[in-house]
Amino acid sequence: MPRSPLPSVPSRLIDVEVAGRAKRGAPEALLVPEGAVASASSLPSLPSGVPAELGFGGKEGEVAVLPGAEGPRWVVGLGKGAPRHFRAAGAAFVRAAQSYADVEADSGGRPPLTVQVRFPESALAGDYAAFATGALLGGYRYRVTSDEKPARVRTVRLLVPDGSGGDVGNVGEFADAVSRARELGRATALARDLANTPSNVKTPAWLSNTAESVARDVRGLTVTVRDEKWLAEHGFGGILAVGGGSANAPRLIELSYRPEGATTHLLLVGKGITFDSGGLSLKPAEGMHLMRTDMSGGGAVIAALRAIAALELPVRVTGLVPSAENLVSGSSYRPGDVVRHYGGRTTQIDNTDAEGRIVLADALAYGIATYRPDVVVDVATLTGAMKVALGLRTGGLFATDDDLALRIGAAGDEVGEQWWRMPLSSEHADAVRADVADVRQCPPGPGGITAALFLREFTADVPWAHLDIAGPARAEGTYAEVVPGGTGFAARTLVEFTASYAR
């Protein structure tokens, strides 16, 4: 068998550590709030007049280099110092440091392996965590290339000021916050890896095997993979219909984390379509290459379960990822077909390109009937309508329970992922009913809302939320800690949401 041309998963990220003392010889950066540049006395470690000379204003993500005989030194803008500004600063600084390292290597110099960052004395542990998140993810890069890897910064050292106890090594609170941020960053990076992997490698079997692989080094997390024979025996007509047109058979990935003493059980369900051609309702060629990321919801669930177990959160969590390829062949499912889901409910197929809700229906019905969870959350790149409604940086949130919606929104705010609650409009509920089946796949009306109303039919009145990430799951450019490609959006929210049940 030929060796895979792709990078290993998960990608190796830079190390971020907290220290009370600087490392001799390692270049440094100074974080500068936007208002501080107006007063030289407020920046005793910054050479007098430097901000004016550089045209540096301390704006969010602004970076300037101070050349010197002892090597580079950077000033990095913090804007107004909100958590999102610290994340943006971390990302901007790492990119600048890596760019400097690349130039040094190309010119025959010695690129630094470690860089250091000095924080304002007023910075809190959460600010360190936000900067660490930006540093971890801002330098993420997924490339398939024959070129040698360029010189890279390996470690970012965050220095705790003396006023915070750093001089005597009292960095525990800061280190704990950064350690947790590392796990959240790793979750986002893993979700990005899974989304970015090209579909000539990323089949449902590959996704299943990778889920098993990344779970092996985490205590308490188990993965069970259900193949096409098991799915047929147990009546998963939706997953089998969507995957029927591909030579690569579908899978159902079950992840289980059951800490001792847990009193709350969450069910997380993620769409795992490893490539989506649209099936017989074929997509336009333009943009179809991006459909390798159509399993971003499933990737977020896999990555979140790994982080939840690594953080040892005292909450029971089950993850389900129904995975299939939606391709075109003589065995593809057709518009007009009727599919029987797990549990017996039937769906009239209107459009084979609305396949995500078909596989999610099976997984939701199975997960609720089998595990009887307290709360259910599904996440999927489900509808183009949500991109039109909310753009490319905000996820759509539908929920049957106000407290559940508030928890998810608060979790997103905490980790830097933005959600907007959408209505489950009752006037469209009857449109989900079908003439020749129990429900229809694509009822008329606003697409994002009717898709959510379809999924609600399979939730058995359990408190449920649906997260539509069609917009923010992919990025065409760089902003804050986001880089082009799969963004890993929703993975951090799911971890923080789970943690809210542990408090």
Image (cartoon, helix red, strand yellow):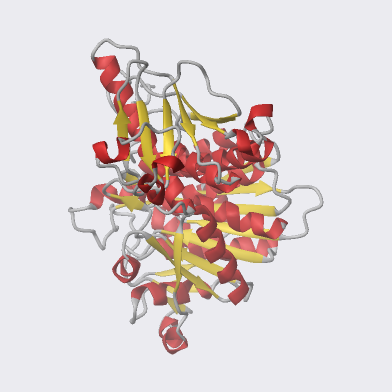
The vertical placement of 410 against 187, above or below, is below
Asked whether 59 or 358 is in front, the reply is 59
Residue drawn 62% across and 37% down?
A: 163
The vertical placement of 93 against 184, above or below, is above
Could you say which quadrant of the image residue 449 lies in? bottom left
Residue drawn 39% across and 28% down?
A: 7
Q: Left or right: where does residue 478 sit relative to residue 460? A: left
Q: Position of residue 139 (x, y in %)?
A: 38, 35
The vertical placement of 345 against 394, above or below, is below
Query: In this orientation, does residue 46 appear?
Result: yes
- Which quadrant is the C terminus positioned in? bottom right
Asked whether 104 or 476 is in front, the reply is 104
Q: Position of residue 113 (x, y in %)?
A: 43, 19
Q: Position of residue 82 (x, y in %)?
A: 47, 54
Could you say which quadrant of the image residue 178 lies in? top right
Q: Residue furthest top?
A: 108
Q: Position of residue 167 (x, y in %)?
A: 64, 28
Asked whether 108 or 317 is in front, the reply is 108
- Which quadrant is the N terminus positioned in? top left
Residue drawn 75% across and 47% down?
A: 259
Residue drawn 60% across and 62% down?
A: 366
Q: Residue furthest bottom?
A: 427
Q: How many marks?
A: 0
Could you say which quadrant of the image residue 441 lies in? bottom left
Query: In this orientation, does residue 143 appear?
Result: no
Q: Left or right: where does residue 24 sit relative to residue 279? A: right
